[in-house]
Image (spheres, rainbow, N blue to C red):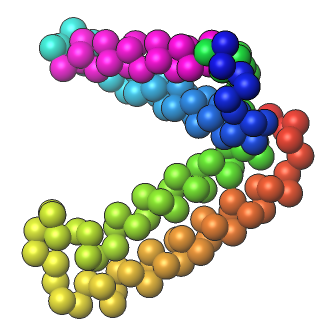
Amino acid sequence: MSTHLLNQNQRRRVDTHLGLLHEDLGNLRRWAGALAETPAGRRIAEVIRLLEGEIDAVRQRFALRDTEPPPLKRRVGAIAEVWRARMEDLRARHLESYGTVHPDLPAALDPYIDRFEHLLRELAQVAVQLPETTA
């Protein structure tokens, strides 16, 4: 065991993100169910199994919980943080890899991204006020 390598806050952070990833993988498995008998569907299922194996390995190595979902406090905070980071990719300057960016796009799109980021930051701050034990 490597439990001494993570402090309590780090343990909660890793544990929360692994729990959310595990849930998302379960959703992917259900969504891809109709493709189960195709080569791509079989590969998706295999990669999901491999990812779940890695999640289990990390949980075992660091003695993290593996049965109950993260409390609402940590869920809200983690989801807000992840989506705030993803919002940056939606700024006009980052859309060039998808094609030529119209010169007026930054002025039209980026203010919305600013508001998304602000609201997601606020959501993460409010999550801190939730009790640790909520489901």
Assign the C terminus to one quadrant of the image: top right
Q: Give the left or right position of residue 134, taking residue 51 as reference.
A: right
Q: Give the left or right position of residue 52, taking residue 56 as reference.
A: left
Residue at 40% in and 67% down: 88
Where 57 sits versus 10, above or below? above
Number of numbered labels in the structure image: 0
- Percent across and percent down for residue 31 are 38, 26
* In-front residue for pair 32/1: 1
Q: Give the left or right position of residue 131, taking residue 125 as reference.
A: right
Residue at 47% in and 60% down: 85
* In-front residue for pair 25/128: 128
Asked if residue 59 lies in the magenta stretch, the reply is: yes
Res 67 → quadrant: top right
Q: Give the left or right position of residue 98, taking residue 106 as reference.
A: left
Range covered by the magenta-colored residues:
40-60
Assign the N terminus to one quadrant of the image: top right
- Percent across and percent down for residue 65 are 72, 20
Asked if residue 85 lies in the magenta stretch, the reply is: no
Residue at 38% in and 14% down: 50
Q: Is residue 12 visible?
A: no
